[in-house]
Image (cartoon, grey):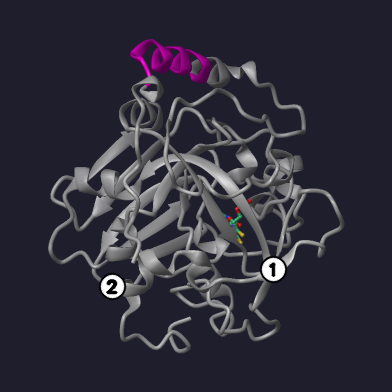
Amino acid sequence: MSLIRIPKVLSSEITPRDTYLRRRELLALAAAGGLAASGIAPVAAAPIPAKKTEFGADETPTPKDDVIAYNNFYEFGTGKGDPAANSGAFKPTPWSITVDGLAAKPKTFDIADLMARMLMEERIYRMRCVEAWSMVIPWVGFPLAALLREVEPLGSAKYVAFETVVRPEEMPGQKGFFQALAWPYVEGLRLDEAMHPLTILATGLYGETLPNQNGAPIRLVVPWKYGFKGIKSIVRISLTETQPPTSWNIANAGEYGFYANVNPTVDHPRWSQATENRVGGGGFFGANRRDTLMFNGYADEVASLYAGMDLKANY
Ligand code: MTE
């Protein structure tokens, strides 16, 4: 049963225009250097007005301290603490995203304009990393479909390709002798996955603008897929006819496929994917082990996208 729940909006949750304007002032302040590089990434530059939805209302969010301290963002280093420690000099404003490729109206969007114009929603999503840790994160963002509709995808468009910024001067993991991946980090979705209402572009978490380590100023969130699909700090989104390359598949095709749907019955070649550790809430890592759910618990919403597909072959 269960279709996507239609979010209820209370009139008290609709944000007045002056709150948006106030937020734009704060963003401008942040851009002007109000958040000085301190060696520690600036956290939560400004509140984002967002309507609360019913997504994940029954979940207990992972403490914010864990969400912003335990990250994967190889542009800032491969350790889980590296993104928080090394992203202080990264400048997420001003920022623009180009949406192009097989579209009738390709366009470059300014992030401040998008954030002011799009209807922002807070959605609490279960997230699951391929390395078997999981979190529940209150994201703030808007459906990717809303942005794609604005450029009018052509009938020939079958996939969506995503690209992260390349800025070695601000991203220490992109320079030097050892580089963990080929840059830019790239990801992709099938067009129907990209248009699915669960797929969002997040610009914040815990009601505030995204910290640099979580993918400021805008990143992808696809809650039924492993975390590596959630490409951060996006500068380009392109509609394509053929399946786009993806960073982890380029790095190791035997271990990371294009689909990356959370699937407890398909193991990673080097470890089981049947259980996961829920990060946070005190206790030692491992105390929160639980069974992983098919499609990360979103099977009712997304299983039909893969009807008839062999999910062992299409991992
Ligand atoms: N995006 C970029 N550009 N670079 C990365 O290294 N890591 C991915 C994904 N997006 C990554 C990225 C991986 S492996 C995971 S698990 C998630 O980001 C982690 O997101 P979080 O740190 O916000 O929890």
Where is residue 8? Give x, y as percent.
34, 37
Q: Can residue 170 be seen in this view?
A: no
Kindly state the secondary structure of the residue where label 2 is placed: loop
Task: Return the residue nearer the eye: 269 or 13.
Answer: 13
The N terminus: image quadrant: bottom left
Q: What residue type is labelled 1?
A: Arg
Which disc, if any, is residue 290?
Answer: 1
In the rendered structure, the answer to whether residue 169 lies left or right of residue 145 reads right
By secondary structure, the bulk of the magenta-drawn segment is best described as: helix
Q: Residues within 10 Å of mark 1 (few under 14, many from 20)?
A: few
Ligand 1, what quadrant? bottom right
In the rendered structure, are the residues bearing label 1 and label 2 in contact, judged by CB atoms less than 8 Å apart? Answer: no
Residues drawn in magenta? 15-27
Q: Which residue is located at x 61 percent, y 64 percent? A: 181
Q: In this view, does 35 lie above or below 79?
A: above
User: Which residue is label 2 attached to?
Assistant: 242
Q: What is the total number of numbered labels drawn onto the structure image?
A: 2
Say which of marks 1 and 2 sits in front: 1
Which disc, if any, is residue 227?
Answer: none
Q: Which residue is located at x 49 percent, y 17 percent? A: 28
Mark 2 Cβ inside 8 Å of ligand 1: no
